[in-house]
Image: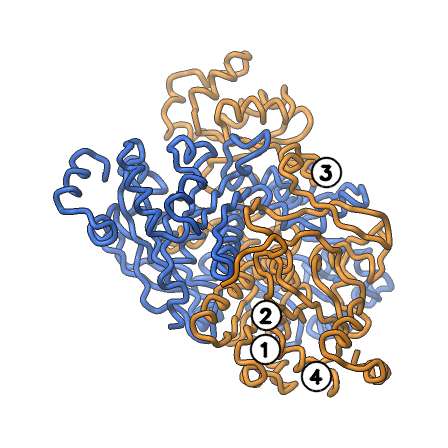
Chain colours: A orange, B blue
Amino acid sequence: MKAADKNDSLLQGIRVLDVADEKASFCSKLLADMGASVIKVEKPGGDASRNIGPFLNNTPHPERSLFFFYHNTNKRGITLNIEHNSGRDIFCRLLKKTDVLVETFPPGYLKGLGLDFEVLRDINPRLILASVTSFGQNGPRKHYQSCDLVASAMGGQMYVSGSPSTSPLKPFGEQSYYASSLFAAIGVLLALQKRRKSGTGEHIDISLQEAVTSTLEHVMIRYFYDYTISTRQGSLYWNHEFCIVPCKDGFIRITLFQQWKTLVEWLDSEDMAGDLMDNKWADEEYRLKHLDRIVEVVKRWTKTHTMSELFEIGQLMGFPWAPISSPREAVESPQLKERGFFVPVDHPEFQKYTDYPGLPYQFTSPMVKQWRRAPLIGEDNIRVFQGELGLSKKEIKKLTSEGAI
Amino acid sequence: MNTKILSGLRVLDFTRVMAGPYATRMLADSGAEVIKIQSKKSATGADSNPSRYFSMWNRNKRSITLDMDYPEARELFLRLTALSDVIFENFSPRVMTNWGLQYKKLKDVKSDLIMVSMSGMGQTGPWKDFVAFGPTIQALSGITYLSSFNKDTPMGLGFAYADVVAGLYAILAVLGALEYRDRTGTGSYIDLSEYEAVCTLLGPALLDTLINQREVLPQGNYSEHIPAAPYGCYRCAGEDRWCVIAIFNETEWQALLKIMGSPEWAYEERFSTLPKRKENTKGLDRFLEQWTAHYEDKELVNRLQEAGIPAGVVQNASDLAKDPQLLARDYFVRLHHPVLGDIISDASPIKLAGGTRVDWKAAPLLGEDNRYVYLELLGLTEKELSSYIKRGVVG
């Protein structure tokens, strides 16, 4: 154990190789943002996830994908064809100096290259392999194809999102990839703890589908309790606690049952309570039965206010309400600004600094010091192949002409 | 060995409802000794021990009662802190400080303590005292706005995703801090904001807003950024049955044409390439749904998958409970609860080849471990404990 110095960071010294596609590039980003040393290994020409938008200035180009930018901050980048014999040799040499390998190949692919976990373990007994796949490494559907849409459907998020009059709805963005990446990164840190005691590595097997199912909160609890199948209810929350109503300038999510008396008195003070001050409404059972009437009266009232009026006054009175914020409103949030959530990242190719969403916590221990933008294609080839593996310029040239790097 | 990765790690769990308990559950599943600090006053509603909600998020943990309104309870808490590695709390900011139990004070009794405060907005900033539940945070972050078919009818997600996300980040932070402590001997204090946690999962949309100054709008299941068409959710035969289909390349498109029996519409010029199909998504989806509506979802998806096409059934809770893939991978686990009887819950989606936990224990009853914790760990005498109980300090 050595004393912390101020240049140290949380995961200092943990070396990660990232051969993952968009399903788990966020996993190694999480580790990189905490200070691990991550090398992104792309196929020559660049990873396919560079073709996923949005793009800088809306111009599709592999070096302008904001999707790729965001998922690969604080990593270094090399290109390497691991299907190529000499590429594979270099990969194995890198693995000797690696603590964690993150991959998203279909089950059996690495075995086909002669690189299944048993082989990797022989190369480096301390290696932690994190595999993120569509349905996991085993089971009847292990070879089924997936993507965020399929994972969200099969995992159960879609069925309970949307309204009774619409189709099921997929959560925005690649949420199945994020959930899987969070679980995978946690798995990596658990495996590091285990390795500290046992000295040996571990194979972590994450299924996109299972990661999604693990985010469903009430859905499976209710089913296993009395076989209730949760359905889509638009903006109305499953337990009727929350709903979304219109305001002058947008929408707000409010509660209908918390502090009922305070709520109707607030409406009444503006002559908008209708009949809700009547005694019968004091009974929660009655309110639940006549929810539509309450929503109707409350809506009439909320429409006379702006989102921020209701949000701020409501919060002062202890109501857990919030405006339905657009991304624009989120990036302008005074709360996020005050906490320094957005961090400056230098993109010398385009402009000086750009704000990125940063880390969701303030940590007394040091995280990554200065954020670095995602690597360009093969940006660190020379530094890694020459500097770390000790290949000569001539060897690198040969490997390049063979298409290995 | 494998089943008890975190054995020897002691965690004090001062959290309630979902986000915090979800985080400490994973540590408990991994072998940490998690001690929930409850009281008769706080153990109500979703936090009442024999409730199904509580039992889901608190398995493998211990429970003690300690009423923090008593100054002596805070003394006992400090003594427990000295014997612990990690503290989780999700009170509103100020509560721990008002009790004189802020990180600085706790560090005095345990110098390398790791503590995480989980709150909606974080411990600082103009909104720090705002009240927030998962759906509140989802609204503020933008995920509710964006997860809708259009901006005039916001819908959002039908579950408290934000709470799960905050829980996952909390575990990640604590395990990172543990790695740091093991290497440097230094503890950490972590101020986690659930609001920020969800915002990190909207990165590309926020960057699009920040860098391109674009207005990012909700688009339902469609995404202009995904290079796939068809890409959507389609009605199948039966009551409220649906499937999803995603076609990323020509091979998959040809395979789909073959399964559909090469219908005439599919050969129209406007559907001839992926970019053209993407441009004419609405027309494409209408045709496709006329076809899918004739088939039973599971049968159709299996046929599509056999042909190498990414497709899936939109599964509800009942489908999930019977899902052969989840069952083959032991996704569900059955626990025996002394009051609720057998309960089924999800195991961990983090599968380790070295093996995962086998000795599951259902959630504790209120104060079930008072004797173990107060007598064995803290070394109180029987007399002292009964005096604390009588006065309501332990209660």
Q: Earlier in the sequence, mark 2 or mark 1?
A: 1
Q: Secondary structure at mark 4?
A: helix
Q: Secondary structure at mark 1?
A: loop
Nearer the camera: disc 3 or disc 4: 4
Q: Earlier in the sequence, mark 3 or mark 1?
A: 1
Please report contact status of discs 2 and 1: CB closer than 8 Å, yes or no. Answer: yes
What is the number of the mark on residue A133? 2
Q: Which residue is mark 4?
A: A88
Measuring 52% from the left and 17% from the top, which residue is drawn there? A267
Q: Amino acid at mark 1?
A: Pro
Q: Amino acid at mark 2?
A: Thr
Subunit of mark 4? Answer: A
Measuring 52% from the left and 28% from the top, which residue is drawn there? A295
Is residue B250 at least partly visible in the picture? yes
Towards the viewer: A382 or B22 = A382
Subunit of mark 2? Answer: A
Q: Secondary structure at mark 2?
A: strand
- Same chain assignment for discs 3 and 1: yes
Q: How far apart are the two marked residues, 3 and 2, measured between alpha carbons?
A: 33 Å
